Image (cartoon, rainbow, N blue to C red):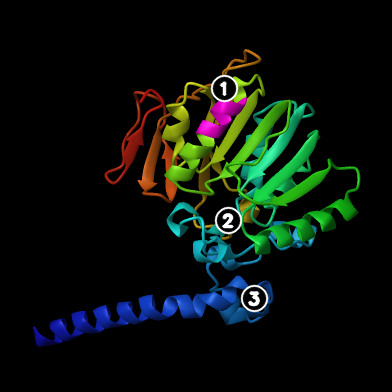
Amino acid sequence: MRAEVLDQKFQAFSQRMKDRFKPLLSAPLHYTSVRRGLEMIPYLGARLPAWHRTHPFDRQYGTDTSGVLSAQRIVTDKTPASEICPYTGSQPSIIRRAIAALGETDKFHFVDLGCGKGRAMIVATEFPFRSIRGVELSSRLARIARRNLARVGRCFPARPPVAVVEGNAITFPLPEGKIALFLYHPFGLELLSHLTIEMESFLSRGNGPLYLIYYNPVHGDVLDASPAFTRWYADTLPYDDSELGFGPDTEDNVVIWRSINGEAATPHPHADRPIIITKPKLRAELAESCGTHTLPAQGQLMSPNN
């Protein structure tokens, strides 16, 4: 009995030490040169966390979009860290399939709010958008994104024009015309609510139409409740085989909303699939279909009819 008690105390102590020193040990991984140096050491490289490993996408393009940057390293004095999500790179294959769901893209402006290091923007250059713009709060991430996009632009000069703006994504002036707005769960409920109000005002002045691509739609209920938007697409998309091990999961979820103004378009099948929050503030999944879902024990259901 005494041995069991001692073992429990030791396990508790070990966990406290891990929690205390984890920030110190993970801090160097914010630097690309450190991560890539560790990857050259067989034992250590194989044990790097999934998001810290150099993604095959970066090896393909010669870019730096891998790694993690905490909210505390992104945040400014005017924005609470609780409303900013850490930087992590989305999966390129999922971005491609989400964009492909729009159909022909040559009349769209692509705008990435919270563009990070520019991975989604780089993927967007593979499509014939009218223009591609990104907005990023962190000066460090914006600088890296510009460097990445410049490199891709030199290799592929015929691709659409791109621009990265350092600033507030909520108040960023959207372009005139048809817009594909991309979000990879960049901020919390309060900021997304403010953004939705801004978009409703923008659309009320006759702008748009606007298609909002929400990758990992943790706060999708805000869009579902907006009178300015309707569901257009919802799907669970698996990682490509080459992406397995370079993210924490094997599939991710995407929902696209379309503004009700402008063109009348038929939504994709099962666009009304309810959103299930499986990790509060962090991860959203989709039920099979409205009215026929199976709710996980720890899930929180958000119906598009709420």
Q: Residue at x 42, y 81 (%)?
A: 21
- The residue at which mark 2 appears reads as 244
On residue 39, which mark appears?
A: 3
2 vs 3, front mark? 3
1 vs 2, front mark? 1
Image coordinates for residue 147, horizontal then vertical, percent = 78, 60
Q: Which structural element holds mark 3?
A: helix
Q: Residue at x 29, y 46 (%)?
A: 298
Depicted 65 relative to depicted 304: above or below: below
Depicted 111 relative to depicted 4: above or below: above
Q: Dot 2, crowdedness within 10 Å: few (<14), some or many (≥20)?
A: some
Depicted 117 relative to depicted 173: above or below: below
- In reply to whether residue 199 is colored magenta, the answer given is yes
Q: Nearer the viewer, residue 74 or 51?
A: 74
Which contiguous range is marked in magenta? 197-202
Q: In the image, 26: left or right of 278?
A: right
> Residue pushed farthest left?
1
- In reply to whether residue 288 is colored magenta, the answer given is no
Identify the amino acid type marked 2. Answer: Leu
Q: Dot 1, crowdedness within 10 Å: few (<14), some or many (≥20)?
A: some
Q: Main secondary structure of the magenta part?
A: helix
Q: Nearer the viewer, residue 275 or 5?
A: 275
Q: Which structural element holds mark 1?
A: loop
Identify the amino acid type marked 3. Answer: Glu
Q: Quadrant of residue 158?
A: top right
Q: Earlier in the sequence, mark 2 or mark 3?
A: 3
Q: Are marks 3 and 1 in contact (CB under 8 Å)?
A: no
- The residue at which mark 1 appears reads as 268
